[in-house]
Every structure is written in structure tokens, then in C-alpha cells.
Amino acid sequence: MLQDPALTFPTPASVDAAIKKGFVTLDDEITHDSVQKVLKSKSKVVAAEILAPALSGSCALLSFYDSRSKELRVACTGDSRAVLGRRTGNGKWIATALSLDQTGGTESEDARLRKEHPNEPYVTMNGRILGNLEPSRAFGDAVYKWTKETQDKLKSSYFGRTPSKYLKTPPYVTAEPVVTTTTVDPTKGDFVVMASDGLWEMLTNEEVVGLVGQWLEKQASTSSVGGRSTNSTSGWLQSWFTTQKASTLPIEHHGPDEASGQRAPIRQQQWGVPTGQDQRFVVEDKNAATHLVRNALGGKDSDMLSALLTLPAPYARRYRDDLTVQVIFFGEGEGNGKVELNKEASATANGAANGVGGEVRAKL
């Protein structure tokens, strides 16, 4: 009996392979095809334009959700992170990491690199590739992928940098992602937070999931009183934050932990951030991602928030990293099934609707 081709679906392995191939192919175009174009053109103008992405670097995080199987794939290249939030039967939340921070300090990444580059003691040093770059997987960062001959040629004739003295057998950095698969349960109100390392340098996985839970609770309580704002917080949320450091932390770890590569939020110590929900966190945004960014940068400490947003580049990099945050909800609550713009959470939504500009940005 022949199967209807319209009803066939790709295998999980083929989906994973396609994602990895897409990442690697794109990076090859950025990193290696650009060199061939420069050498062919023999133009410094062309070199300045197309070598810039190769000499720069970027991490990547991709999610792919199959509504049929309820499987969520997360592909990670670098030190961005995805975390699943799921509410349990007793009303508490579980934070499950769906990706591993890929750095020279990650045990599995360090082992991989040392296996691929034997007899190179400085392939990772102080948690960094060749003692310099922290992410072990990334787009671009071509100085860790080009041969010494290529780098010398580009530097002498066009634009480039002096190769590391430890460079022997590149590439040391790859854009190939690690893909994980998790079954999502929309009936439990599952959500996923995808964010660049700037967020995770400021908040733990548990704090992020707890803050989204706090945000959800605020939306529900506001709705339940006819749209009036309320500051009520349920007991389970209070216990979440007040017992963070205790042995009875109401969190189950189902993903990678700090020992296997997920780093602690180093900025909290740098800034001297106080502990405890009452001192730190606030709920005043209609957008869940903006809510996370606000609390990462200062929360109730409006002076800290303003300072970190005011610092200009490149000085700001000493105190905060880039912050890109997405919160994806899989709940099966009431609704019309349509994707709609949250006008209250968008700074220029009204202007865009009236034809004044088309960019929509969240308020902060």
C-alpha cells in the first residue's frame, strides 16, 4: 500500500541535519566565500565591505516547533540560552535548560577541542579559545577558522589582524549547532525564554522563569479585577523567591547546570545586587520580554536601570552585554488563535498603525 506523499513527514534526524547544514553553509559563505571574493576582486573597498562580517562574530539560537508532535527543537551556536518554564500540579514552576553554553570553559566543549587538536595545550586557556575568544561555536570569528597563510595574505594586502601565536591547526571555532529536542506540553502553560548571554549574565534560569511566572500572575490578577492594576502576589511566587538560596528551592533541574557549562550570573556580584524579590524585582510592563530586561538591568533600582541604559558603547560593554530576549508561550487558553500585535507593549504601535513609521519596539 502506497503512502500519500502529502502525509509524509521528515524524520527527526533529517530535521536536525537540515538545521546543522543551514548553519554551517551560512557560515561558510560569511567566512570562506568572502575571502575568495576579495582575492578575485583585488579591491580594498570590496575587502572592507565583505570581510567585516567574517572578522566579527555572532552566536545564534534557533527554535523549531512541530505542533503535530509537540516537539520543540532548539539549535544553539555559542553562549545564548533557551530555558523552558513549566508549571507543576502544585502551582510551582520548573526551569529546564534546553541548551548548553558553548564556551572554552564548558567541560564538553573543552574535551571536544582537545580531541580535535591534540598536543595543543593552549587550544583552551582560562576558559577561552586560544586564551582569547570565549564562545567555542560562532558565526564569523574567522581568525579562529582561517589558516595562518590566509590571514597573513589578507593583512598584508587588505584588512585583517595578526594571527594568534597559538594558531596551528584551525578551525578552532565552528558554527555547527548542538540541537536538542524537548516535548512541549501546552496544557501546562509551557513557555520558552530564548535570550543572548546578556540576560544570563544577570539572572539565573530560575529567576528568569520565576519572573515570567510573576508576570503571568500579574496579568491574571489585573484581568480578574476588571483591568485595575494590583500588586497581589500568590504564595507560591513568594516562596519561589524567598527560598532561592535555601535547600528547599522549589525548582527541579532537568537540563545542563553550571558544572557542565552554564555559567552563573556574574554581573550580580559585579553590581552588588541585593538578594530577595522585594528588593529587586518589579512588574510594570505589558510585554514579558521587556519585563525580563527591566529586571535584569535593575528592576526596582531605577537609578541602576537608567545608568546601564545610558552608558555609551563601547564603555557599556564593561557593565552589560547585548540583550536580546524572546518569550514564547505555548498555552492552550481561550483566544481566537490569531497572532496579534500587543499595542500596549509597543512603543510605536499607534504611529505604525497610522502610517507613521513601521518599526515596532517594546517600551522600557
Image: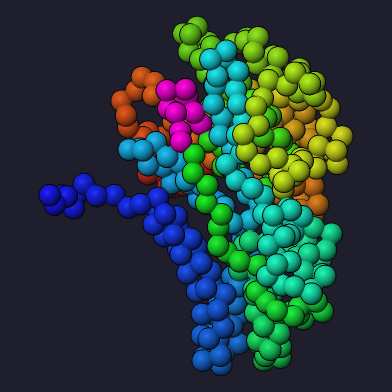
Q: Judge left or right: residue 67 versus residue 165.
A: left
Measured from the top left, where is residue 27 in percent x and y? 53, 69
Quarter assignment of residue 131: bottom right
Above or below, 33 relative to 87: below
Measured from the top left, where is residue 140 in percent x and y? 61, 68
Residue 173, can we see it?
yes
The tally of labels here is 0
Above or below, 53 relative to 126: below
Measured from the top left, where is residue 308 in percent x and y? 75, 42
Residue 60, can we see it?
no
Give the residue drawn at x 54%, y 40%: 326
Quarter assignment of residue 349: top left
Q: Is residue 186 shown in magenta?
A: yes
Q: Quadrant of the C terminus?
A: top right
Q: Judge left or right: residue 333 versus residue 155.
A: left
Give the colouring mode of the picture.
Answer: rainbow
Measured from the top left, where is residue 255 in percent x and y? 62, 38
Q: Give the range drawn in magenta.
A: 183-191
Give the residue drawn at x 36%, y 35%: 339
Outermost residue on the top side: it is: 225
Q: Is residue 166 shown in magenta?
A: no
Above or below, 162 relative to 60: below
Above or below, 84 relative to 245: below
Give the residue drawn at x 48%, y 13%: 223
Outermost residue on the left side: it is: 1
Give the residue drawn at x 77%, y 55%: 105
